[in-house]
Amino acid sequence: MLRIAVPNKGSLSGPAAEMLHEAGYQQRRESKELRIVDPTNEVEFFYLRPRDIAIYVSTGRLDIGITGRDLLVDSGAGAEEILPLGFARSTFRYAAKPGTIGDVADLNGKTVATSYEGIVAKHLADGGIDASVVHLDGAVETAIELGVAEVIADVVETGTSLRNAGLEVVGEPIMKSEAIVVRRTGADIEEPKVQQFLRRLQGVLVARTYVMMDYDCRVEQLEKAVALTPGLESPTVSPLHNEGWVAVRAMVPANEAQRVMDDLYAIGARAILTTAIHACRL
């Protein structure tokens, strides 16, 4: 039975449970449940603190975990990313008072306050920067005002919180994070049960990204239509009862669907429909 760690709370928890449900796995009904068994799919789920998941997976007691890339790197655990999941995206950056720090090289000799000591220490070491790191559990924006540090490193989304604290970002992003699937470093990811799990999640990702588009067009316009909707390998084309017309079906990126429908209509296609894809295997 495959043993999988799932975030029990925070921004990762809800989207992870939703994705697993879409992938056909049973999920807990109450937030107090710490472990459930899905006998149909031969999977056992453990609901753990997101920050601890990479550590549990690294021991080999759990086969797979869903956590954040930031939490994996920060933990320093012997686990590795095997699939990005596309949600809970965030960007880590340095910030300081305007005019005090020009770029990352200016961090030499400075003190950096952060809730992600592992990430920052690694980034500084990789860049050959000699700076001290102070660990704080949240609200790091106040560290500069209170004299704890000259620089902070934190998640930056819109930058509003930084501006409100009188700070500005410094240099390039430290890292970009998102939800990921992790496996113990060196473990066999070709194991059939692991591959089946990954295929299911990949199917959900594709289903969320594409729609199925159906339309009718005249034969003489087919090449133009196919150029607009090439599909993944090739669209399905079927003759219609009315001579000179064909029906076409193809997968189209969801964020381009409206534009493609407009372009198809402009070349004479009609009965253009899009439908959601709930699951797939490619």
Image (cartoon, rainbow, N blue to C red):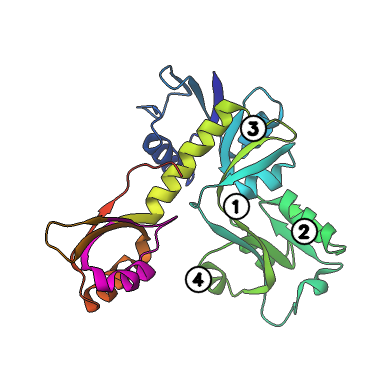
Q: CA distance from mark 1 to mark 4?
A: 16 Å
Q: SS at mark 2? A: helix
Q: Which residues are magenta?
A: 213-237
Mark closer to the observer (4, 2): 2
Mark 2 or 1, nearer chain start:
2
Where is residue 267 shown, x and y percent of the image?
25, 77
Q: Is residue 159 left or right of residue 227?
A: right
Q: Residues within 10 Å of mark 3 (few under 14, many from 20)?
A: few
Q: SS at mark 3? A: loop
Q: Which mark is residue 148?
A: none
Mark 2 or 3, nearer chain start:
2
Q: SS at mark 1? A: loop
Q: Which residue is denoted by mark 4 in the rendering?
A: 160
Q: Which residue is denoted by mark 1 in the rendering?
A: 138
Mark closer to the observer (2, 3): 3
Q: Which residue is denoted by mark 2 in the rendering?
A: 123
Mark closer to the observer (3, 4): 3
Mark 3 or 1, nearer chain start:
1
Mark 1 or 4, nearer chain start:
1
Q: Nearer the viewer, residue 273 or 84?
A: 273
